[in-house]
Amino acid sequence: MRDPSGPELLLFARALLPIAPEARGRTAARILQEVEAADRHFLGRGCSHPDFGDGSLMARCLLLSPPAEPLARDPDFLAATMIACNALLQHFKA
């Protein structure tokens, strides 16, 4: 997985918004696993994974058609952003 940028983090949070709050942590972990799979596919075959993109968090999240970015004061967006941050922290600890 390529190192994600700040805008990718916010896009990741947006991709979690349509998911039920109690399922967002599991969904975030699954998305990161899919990004890793896409990256391996891209490095091995030289082309994007048909379902998960090119190995970037941005590509994977864009394929999920996230909603428009809400205002930063939106409590649901803030909660999703915290979940996205924690998922990335856990992912990079492993």
Image: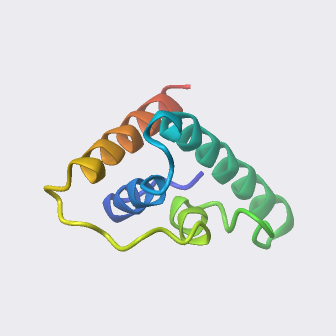
Q: Is residue 26 above or below residue 13?
A: above
Report the front residue among 69 and 44.
Answer: 69
For image coordinates 61% across by 48% down, the residue present is 31
Residue 27 in the figure: left or right of residue 10 = right
Residue 52 drawn at (x, y percent): 71, 62
Report the front residue among 38 and 43.
Answer: 38
Q: How is the image coloured?
A: rainbow
Q: Which residue is outermost to the right?
A: 45
The quarter of the rendered structure image containing the C terminus is top right
Residue 30 drawn at (x, y percent): 64, 42
Q: Is residue 45 above or below residue 27?
A: below
Q: Is residue 71 above or below residue 19?
A: below
Residue 69 in the figure: left or right of residue 64 = left
For image coordinates 13% across by 55% down, the residue present is 73
Q: Is residue 57 above or below residue 23?
A: below
Q: Which residue is outermost to the front?
A: 20
Residue 35 drawn at (x, y percent): 64, 53
